[in-house]
Image (spheres, rainbow, N blue to C red):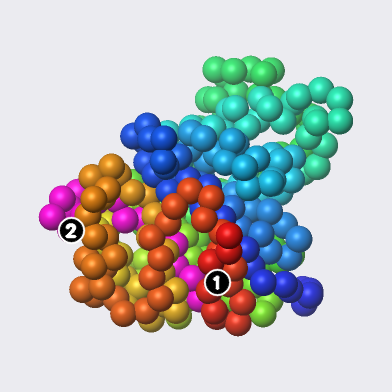
Amino acid sequence: MPVIDMEAVKVTILGSGTCVPSLKRSSCSVLVETGGAKLLFDMGAGTMRRLLEAGVTIGQISHLFFSHLHPDHTGELAGFLFASKYPNERRRRSRLRITAAEGFMDFYERLERVYGQWIELEEGIIDIFEMRSSEPDFMELDFSNVDTVPMAHTESSIGYRLTMPDMTSIVYTGDTDYCKGAVRLAMNADLLISECALPDEMKAPGHLTPSLAGRIASEAQVKNLVLTHFYPECDGVDIEAQCRKTYGGRLVCAEDLMRIEIANGRLSLLK
């Protein structure tokens, strides 16, 4: 990985919710800004609006990363591509790199068959990379190393770990149940962004509760934990108290448009 000057990594929670419509929480999406690049992890309904509210246009996004193919994580991909064809100065001309697990190319080609020319960008604009969904995988980018590990959700669910040249590390689980893969991926991370779908007493297969997310963070010895992907059942429940049963480190419950800065292993919440 080339050595480049690094500023603090900035993270914006664009969507802290799920598939359930909410005026408070959009579907899953996280923006990471590092090394001059703007990375988008998942893009459920409401992502593009939240991007604008965060002061970022879709044309500035250089990389898309998908954790899996459920609609609340991929629902705005077609709209994103359609909007990228807007004529004149707003038309996308810079390259877009899309990374997802095995099976994404088939998903993308099926979208093209449905929407045709409406989502087809100019030749050479999009590069698609598939990561292994059955075992850990790795890629090197100019601004970060990227590790992926299968998650316990669907057959094609993967979590991501970014490791910057200054060794700052950010982990995004996507949807998952408790699994040793999540612990390995998050080991000693500066920031773990973990799904936390439902309260402890409403545990659902393939999803984490606060205490399970805390268990992963504790076993991995992460420095900072952000819980996100809240179903409405989490409203009115003391999610932090449930997570504290298993995790004693820095803890934040995500809200839409929450801005986080991570530098030298320290997390700061920005207005």
Compared to residue 86, the image places residue 96 above or below, namely below
Q: Position of residue 59 (x, y in %)?
A: 74, 40
Residue at position x 58%, y 64% from top? 270
The stretch drawn in magenta includes residue 155: no
Q: What kind of residue is marked 1?
A: Ser
User: Magenta residues?
Assistant: 190-206
Q: Is residue 43 left or right of residue 193?
A: right
Residue in the picture at 68% in, 27% down: 83
The single residue placed furthest to the right in the displayed view is 88
> In the orientation shown, which residue stands out farthest toward the front?
271
Residue 172 image position (x, y, % from top left)? 47, 60
- The answer to whether residue 199 is magenta is yes
Q: Which mark is residue 268?
A: 1
| Quadrant of the drawing holding the C terminus | bottom right
Residue placed under numbered mark 2 in the picture: 200
Tell me if residue 23 comes above or below residue 167 in the rendering.
above
Q: Residue at x 41, y 41 (%)?
A: 24
